[in-house]
Image (cartoon, rainbow, N blue to C red):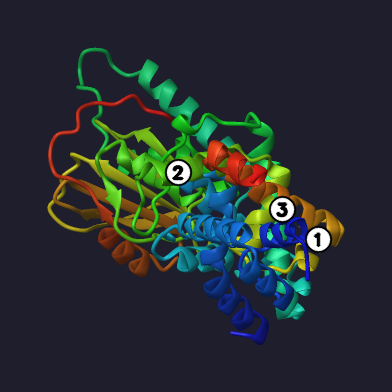
Amino acid sequence: MIDCVTFRRRLLENPLQETRAMARHEANCHTCASYAQQVRSTERALQDMLDVDVPPELAERVQLAVSYQRAPRTERRRPLQLATAASLLLAVLVGTLWLTRPQGLEPPHQLTLSESVFHHIDDEIHVLRQPGPVGPYKVEQVFSRFGARLTRAIGPVSFAAECKMRHKTGVHLVIPGEMGAITVLFMPGEMTDGPQAIATARFEGEILPTRWGSIAIVGEHGEHLDALAGRLQQSVDWPAGDYGEKVAAS
Amino acid sequence: MDKLQQQFDTLVKAVSPELYRYAMGLCRNAHQAEDLVQETFLRAWRAQDNLRNPKAARAWLYTILRNENARLYERQRPEVRDPDDLPPIPCRGYDTSPEAFALRQALQELDLDYREPLLLQVIGGFSCKEIGQMLDLNTNTVLTRLFRARKALGRRLAPQDNEAREHS
């Protein structure tokens, strides 16, 4: 028969494993039996404490992140340098036109919503190359600044930030797509009458009306955006109302 | 969908809950725990040749998560955190009794060398031999650490009571 020291050592190594020798000792030693009862009670409490709830759809989110890694990467149509050079050229051109404009004759040009969307993408073209993925809680955190929340997983996100839009701040996401990166802008207060298709030489997409503003979804030509649009509209619960002006973070 | 991909998806569904619990036991932060699980599977997929043996895959995933936690978070934090600063862990039937609070505090104060084998045994159900392989320790060292971990927990939970028992 094992002694008390051996019994207690084995008990503490694994309280749920009981050998015959341990059972015999426990039956004959009142003190050790009482000690074993206490240790097993603590062990059960420990198990309960560690049995935390797992976030809903954790496995699905992991699978989505992995599926993004599985997908073959498509070559970007234009290198970053070319896009940057184009942006600089555009900036110089706009600046020159602005400086040489006839003074006092025309009111300053008010950007349309679609123009402001493409300007925003051009201004932050570097974020399309963010490798990501951004963790789901970081994404939720960005939305939470607007009182919005995600009701279900929206899939892999490679960039998420609060950004200055045309009039107010909103949420800027970049989501990996089949043809390249997809830009999604959540624009509170930008009310539109209906869905609006928008396009440039490189990008195409649409602006979707919501009860709190609008969502712009823009990808490279040939990108299928419908499924993503549906998913985003269902996944984001954005409160209606006035959100005030916030400081842009990107 | 090829066979490897199917196996991987099955593995994600089967193991992600327990990996999340293990991550929570290590870092006690729900955000970090979820990021750790995601990063673990992303790394596992990149090294998918190691997934040919599904039996070994589970232990391998735990090892990746442990290494990721050390790489990403453990070095950024002080060794011991004040339990009052820790966010509450949402769990089934969350127990707010003083005993449960004391147990959470005691576990968190446990040195990582002792906490890790304990978590692998309680959450993962691994044998001492398997834990030894995962932590690069011999089996006797694992047994010693498990023994000391529980002894320390017991001491912190009821110091006077334990002392009395040990002297009796």
Give the labeled residue for mark 3: B147
The residue sitting at 49% across, 44% down in the picture is B104
Judge by depth and name the residue closer to the eye, B39 or A210.
Answer: B39
Give the labeled residue for mark 1: B132
Q: Which mark is residue A138?
A: 2
Q: Given the image, what chain letter belongs to the residue carrying mark 2?
A: A
The residue sitting at 52% across, 44% down in the picture is B28
As helix, strand or loop, the secondary structure at mark 2 comes to: helix
Residue A13 position by quadrant:
bottom right
Q: Amino acid at mark 3?
A: Phe
The residue sitting at 62% across, 76% down in the picture is B8
Judge by depth and name the residue closer to the eye, B116 or A45.
Answer: A45
Q: Above or below — where is B144 with respect to A115? A: below
In percent of width and height, residue A83 lies at 56, 42
Image quadrant where one finds the N terminus of chain B: bottom right
Q: Above or below — where is A25 with respect to A112? A: below
In the picture, measured across the screen, residue A239 lies left or right of residue A222, that is left
- Marks 2 and 1 close (CB-CB < 8 Å): no
Q: Which mark is residue A90?
A: none
Q: Earlier in the sequence, mark 3 or mark 1?
A: 1
In percent of width and height, residue A233 lies at 26, 59
Looking at the image, which residue sits at the far right? B138
In the picture, measured across the screen, residue A185 lies left or right of residue A176, that is left
Q: Amino acid at mark 2?
A: Lys
Q: Are marks 2 and 3 on the same chain?
A: no
Whole-number angstrom distance, CA of label 2 to CA of label 1:
35 Å
**Residue B168 seen in the figure:** yes
In percent of width and height, residue A135 lies at 50, 49
